[in-house]
Image (cartoon, rainbow, N blue to C red):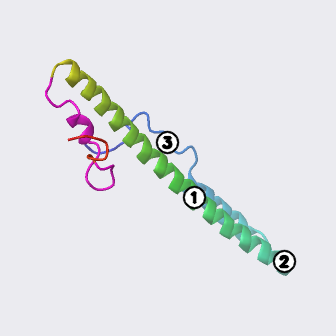
Amino acid sequence: MTSTPQNQPHIPPLQIDLDEILATIALELARVQICNQCQASVSGLIDDLARLVTEITRLHSALVRERLISANLRAAIRAALGAQSDGEPDPLAYLRDEFPDTGGPDASEWGWR
């Protein structure tokens, strides 16, 4: 399934428009006559703003990824509990599916088959 805001209503949208903010900053800086004494400070400020924008974008992406992982784990837990209640022979299979061989914990380490 494609991830879109319509099918993931619980993913928080970024409340600011980073492109608009950067465009406004660039426009305002273009209008300002910067003296030689202030040039280094303004350049440093621009660099800091660029780093902040990058970090905001990175953190928002990380939040979205982690919320998706959390939602998938919660669904797997519910499925495993339901499967156990229904007497399925391997209810933990739902959880193992959420921990692929790469990046997830080793199944044997957790005592899973």
The disc, 3 or 1, on the residue closer to the chain's N-terminal end is: 3
**What residue sits right under mark 2 in the picture?**
35
Gap between marks 3 and 1 measured at Cα: 16 Å
Q: Residue at x 33, y 55 (%)?
A: 103
Gap between marks 2 and 1 measured at Cα: 30 Å
Magenta run includes residue 69: no
Instruction: Choose between 8 and 110: the one closer to the eye.
Output: 110
Instruction: Choose between 84 and 78: the one closer to the eye.
Output: 84
Apparent side of residue 113 relative to residue 61 in the rendered image (left or right): left
Magenta run includes residue 100: yes
**What residue sits right under mark 1 in the picture?**
55
Farthest residue, direction left: 89
Q: Quadrant of residue 9?
A: top left
Range of the magenta residues? 88-106
Q: Nearer the viewer, mark 2 or mark 3?
A: 3
Farthest residue, direction top: 85
Mark 2 surroundings: few (<14), some (14-19) or many (≥20) residues within 10 A:
few
What kind of residue is marked 2? Cys
Q: SS of the residue at dot 3?
A: loop
Q: Residue at x 49, y 42 (%)?
A: 13
Prevailing secondary structure class for the magenta stretch in the rendered image: loop
Quadrant of image for the C terminus: top left
Q: Residue at x 79, y 72 (%)?
A: 41
Quadrant of image for the N terminus: top left
Q: SS of the residue at dot 1?
A: helix
**What residue sits right under mark 3 in the picture?**
13
Residue 7 in view in this figure: no
The disc, 2 or 1, on the residue closer to the chain's N-terminal end is: 2
What kind of residue is marked 1? Glu
Q: Which mark is residue 77?
A: none
